[in-house]
Amino acid sequence: MSVSWPVVLVDGDITLRPIKLRDQRTWREVNRRNRDWLRPWEATIPPPAPGGPLIQRPTYRQMVRHLRAEANAGRMLPFVIEYQGRLVGQLTVAGITWGSMCSGHVGYWVDRSIAGRGVMPTAVALAVDHCFRSVGLHRIEVCIRPENGPSRRVVEKLGFREEGLRPRYLHIDGAWRDHLVFALTAEEVPEGLLNRWHQARPGTAREIK
């Protein structure tokens, strides 16, 4: 199945575009500067089983090549986030499943220096609208550690439903961590998630709490 890739999505100062090998220097600099901010929420590789192979964390080039291969196979949409022309984060729609499910899940991180400016909710809304309107998915999930307040505020601002807890769901920061599941289906945002977010932002007539 096609996932309409590569594609560039834009709303004002915020752009989602495909991650590239030549982003390496900037990506590494942003990631390094935000190491303490990101470490508690980043996926890690669990210890190998006795006698099993030791799996190494991929290099940047290996990561990008894997993301591209998954996008070409219709299983992923890997973006970087730009704000005012500067790379400030990453957003990936992964686990894309077709058939009777037609779903995917979104993961993201952003430079701490621009957190709170509405960049990440806008980026997520852009990606979700693309998934529902162009790709043809029906459901999008975001799974977040209960302790991750900034990430939870993103989905709460956008009106995602909280569906429950997945115990020990992902290996994060060196251990198996519980995650809360938030979800939206296409029927819940017929007017588009980006349009709803713009209407709900502070200073307008309605705000999603």
Image (cartoon, helix red, strand yellow):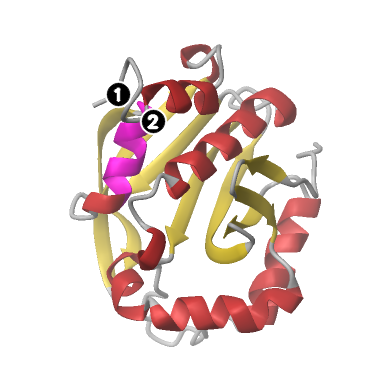
Q: Amino acid at mark 1?
A: Ile
> How many C-alpha atoms fall within 10 Å of the one at disc 1: few (<14), some, or many (≥20)?
few
Disc 1 is placed on an element classified as: loop
Residue tagged 1: 208
Left or right, 66 with reference to 107 = right
Q: Amino acid at mark 2?
A: Leu
Left or right, 199 with reference to 101 = left
Percent x, y for residue 71? 74, 52
Q: Are marks 2 and 1 in contact (CB under 8 Å)?
A: yes
Percent x, y for residue 196? 46, 21
Span colored in magenta: 151-159
Residue 180, compared with residue 57, is above or below; it is above
Residue that lies at the very extreme toward the left in this rendered image? 147
At 74% from the left and 47% from the top, the residue drawn is 8
Q: CA distance from mark 2 to mark 1?
A: 7 Å
Residue tagged 2: 158
